[in-house]
């Protein structure tokens, strides 16, 4: 028999998974009438909530790190981020267990063994993951943090870089060099950070009296969130701001193979200041992300939660 998920209940009632999650967890945000309907349908459909282990909780000394395969396999930045989280966890007296979530497991909301067998005391979700999977995972009632992304509807605690400011500063730098025609490379609906970098880019252009042009916003990922080859526009701008250094590196290589001189014909800026910024020829102008600071902050905030304290709100 197929396991009933919160997504199935939400679809049957034509409501959001967030509403189902709140109702089943006894949280505010849904009316009592809707809560009753959700609970009744959940019982009718045979929904079984994850075992939280209350009453026999054991301290494992482990922190679970969950990351979607498309980020860990495609993006070198996340291996560096994981390394820093691992080191900070060890320094805090915890072991870090990494679980790479496959596309199929994310789609079907299949939970990893570390959650099912209660092998961890808390969770760090590293990189964007679907809301339905996130909601299913947090039904375990484990303390958790989001790392390098956020979810406005859930309002979960997170540690992120200031992507709006980063996109803004990269774009204003290009404008200061005389560039007026500037494109953006990044699938803005793929992650919250790419959207924020695009918003910073757009803000800088608009403040300079320049209208962002749709034909110069290029997709860098497919519908499943994996990197894809960028298709160059028929008429090129003077410069591009890219969603990350790896995308910028690949764009530079494609431009050179297409006969463009970088940066004389087309300038390219990246984001992250990691390996691909130095590998690129010429070296990239990029925005530095304090990966060590992010690792320190996310572990410190999760440890606070593990000790029953509230995570720090505001800038870190």
Image (cartoon, rainbow, N blue to C red):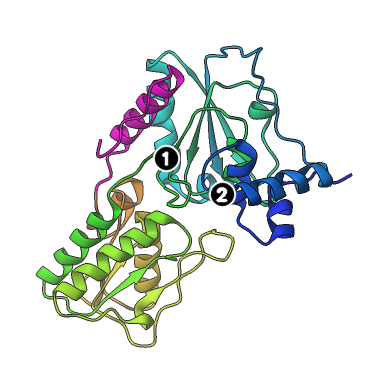
In the picture, measured across the screen, residue 16 lies left or right of residue 47, that is left
Instruction: Please give the name of the residue rendered at 65% of the width and 40% of the height, measured from the top-left corner.
Output: 24
Question: Can you give x and y, in whole percent of width and height, for residue 67 in the image?
Answer: 54, 41
Question: Can you give x and y, in whole percent of width and height, for residue 221 in the image?
Answer: 50, 64
Quarter holding the N terminus?
A: top right
Residue range of the region highlighted in magenta in the rendering: 288-316
33 up-or-down from 115: above or below: below
Residue 30: mark in rendering: 2
How dense is the environment of label 2, judged by Cα within 10 Å: few (below 14), some, or many (20 and up)?
some
Q: Is residue 153 visible?
A: yes
Q: Earlier in the sequence, mark 1 or mark 2?
A: 2
292 up-or-down from 274: above or below: above
- Count of picture labels: 2
Is 67 or 270 nearer to us in this picture? 67
Q: Which residue appears farthest toward the bottom when viewing the image?
A: 234
Q: Which residue appears farthest toward the front when viewing the image?
A: 33
Mark 1 lies on residue:
147
Decide whether residue 291 is among the magenta residues. Answer: yes
CA separation, marks 1 and 2? 27 Å
17 up-or-down from 228: above or below: above
Instruction: Please give the name of the residue rendered at 36% of the width and 56% of the height, measured from the top-left corner.
Output: 244
Q: Secondary structure at mark 2?
A: loop
Q: Is residue 132 visible?
A: no
Is 230 or 173 nearer to us in this picture? 173
Question: Can you give x and y, in whole percent of width and height, for residue 13 in the image?
Answer: 70, 58
Instruction: Please give the name of the residue rendered at 43% of the width and 45% of the height, measured from the top-left corner.
Output: 155
Q: Quadrant of residue 22?
A: top right
How dense is the environment of label 1, judged by Cα within 10 Å: few (below 14), some, or many (20 and up)?
many
Instruction: Please give the name of the residue rendered at 62% of the width and 43% of the height, measured from the top-left corner.
Output: 23
């Amino acid at each position: 028999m197929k396991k009933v998920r919160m997504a199935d209940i939400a679809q049957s009632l034509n409501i959001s998974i967030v509403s189902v999650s709140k109702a089943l967890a006894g949280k505010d945000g849904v009316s009592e009438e809707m809560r009753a309907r959700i609970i009744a349908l959940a019982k009718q459909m045979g929904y079984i909530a994850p075992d939280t282990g209350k009453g026999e909780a054991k301290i494992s000394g482990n922190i679970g790190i969950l990351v979607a395969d498309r980020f860990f396999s495609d993006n070198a930045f996340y291996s560096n981020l994981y390394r820093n989280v691992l080191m900070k966890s060890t320094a805090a007296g915890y072991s870090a267990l990494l679980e790479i979530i496959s596309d199929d497991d994310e789609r079907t909301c299949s939970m990893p063994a570390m959650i099912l067998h209660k092998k961890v005391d808390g969770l760090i979700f590293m990189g964007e993951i679907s809301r339905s999977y996130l909601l299913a995972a947090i039904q375990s009632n484990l303390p958790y943090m989001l790392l390098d992304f956020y979810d406005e509807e859930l309002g979960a605690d997170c540690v992120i870089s200031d992507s709006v400011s980063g996109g803004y500063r990269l774009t204003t730098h290009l404008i200061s060099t005389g560039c007026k025609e500037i494109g953006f490379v990044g699938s803005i609906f793929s992650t919250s950070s790419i959207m924020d970098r695009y918003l910073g880019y757009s803000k800088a252009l608009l403040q300079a009296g320049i209208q962002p042009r749709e034909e110069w916003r290029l997709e860098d990922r497919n519908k499943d969130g994996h990197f894809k080859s960028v298709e160059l526009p028929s008429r090129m701008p003077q410069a591009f701001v890219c969603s990350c250094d790896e995308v910028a590196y690949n764009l530079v290589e494609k431009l050179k193979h297409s006969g463009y001189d970088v940066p004389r014909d087309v300038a390219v800026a990246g984001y992250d200041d990691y390996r691909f910024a130095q590998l690129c020829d010429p070296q990239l102008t990029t925005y530095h992300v304090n990966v060590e600071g992010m690792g320190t902050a996310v572990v410190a905030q999760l440890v606070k939660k593990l000790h029953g304290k509230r995570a720090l709100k505001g800038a870190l």
